[in-house]
Amino acid sequence: MWTNVIGQERVKRILKQALESGKLPNAYLFIGPEGIGKDAAAIEVAKTLNCLTPGHRNIEACDTCENCRSIGNFTSPLVQFIFAKAKASASSSNDSDSDEKEFDVVDIAREELAIKSSDPYHNITIPKAITISLPQMREVIASLSRSVSPDAKRVVIISEADTMIQQAQNAFLKTLEEPHQNTLIILTSSNPSRLYTTILSRCQDLRFELLSPEELSSALIRNEGLEKEQAVFLAKLSGGSYSAARSLINEDVAELRKQVVAFLRMGLSKSRQNALAEIDKVLPKRGGGTFLEKRQNVEQLLELLQLWLRDALAIVAGSEDKIFNADQVDDLKKFTANFNSPKALVEAIHSIEAAKRKVFLQLQLRPVMLELIIEL
């Protein structure tokens, strides 16, 4: 049901109109930051196109028929869900403190997909999975050569399509140039600039907006069982992402914000020697969890860091009513006293965005954070 997609009323209205009229493009490109519902909407489109309940097809998925259930579980032959995977390697029985232990990527991918089937807002994350490969795309192309029932609609969903390597994009472009009958392709992307312009030109783009604090808090209360006060607080800190809001539920947000302020002060001090010591304070300790868990901790810190700078920018711009860290106004004002114009804050926000992309690509965390603090 469309209620499975949080907010995004404009997007849902556009998709409903296209579905009801039957005037769908050959390919969509859903654009927007992580955790705001791009994959969730793509899955709902696939269900709606193939719902078996009379009167529901092309209007709204019933969520109970055989097709709706199998599509939601990613077991339907009508839907392919493509995401970045790592090369398989043999499992290791040796204990090691290494951040990158041997693992069975097939099992991990299966487990992540199972979580995604019950929670479309889950961000599939697999260690060493950086790109969508050429063999993956060849499998998609081969599957499209097989016919489907005339009354069915095949849907290919490529999540974070910008992670396709160049060869995969080249192969996929031929598929876009020669559309297959009864087939809809949906790309989702947080960084569409990484896609070939020829791919972009052959997709109808649909931009997803950041979720409002009201939409987020309502979803956190309904889906996570949070009390209203906590839900409202986390919604304001999340930067419009439902995934980011959920990741903060069990975190000591006050302590994280202290780390953020200390990190920024170290950047302002321009002391590279002290910067290394500060970085080691905020990075998870060696041996303290998997690389994936460490990466997620750093992503949380970067998210809060970016929110703090956006709040500082709002204060400099005279928009104090729009800040997220409403309980930190005095500290924010002291911080912004170091800046004569918004330009430096904007550049700092861009630096953090670049660091987030590098962390997402699973590069080594310490050098990324050192580069960031030097830039700040």
Image (spheres, rainbow, N blue to C red):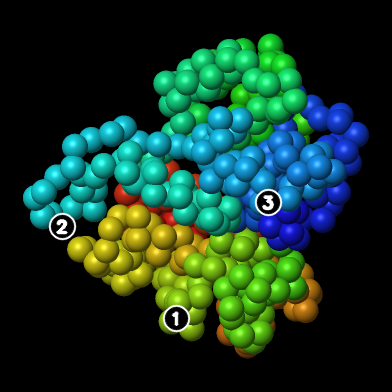
Mark 3 → mark 2, Cα distance in angstroms: 44 Å
Dot 1 amino acid type: Asp
Q: Nearer the viewer, mark 3 or mark 1?
A: 3
Sequence order check: which comes first, mark 3 or mark 1? 3
The outermost residue toward the left is: 94
Q: Nearer the viewer, residue 174 or 275?
A: 174
Left or right position of 104 against 253: left
| Residue 334 in view | no
Sequence order check: which comes first, mark 3 or mark 2? 3
Name the spot of residue 9 as percent of width and height, x first. Answer: 82, 56
Residue visible at 14% across and 45% down in the picture = 92
Q: Nearer the viewer, residue 271 or 213?
A: 213
Q: Which mark is residue 252?
A: 1
Dot 3 amino acid type: Asp
Mark 3 → mark 1, Cα distance in angstroms: 37 Å
- Write down the residue under mark 2: 97
Sequence order check: which comes first, mark 1 or mark 2? 2
- Write down the residue under mark 3: 63
Dot 2 amino acid type: Asp
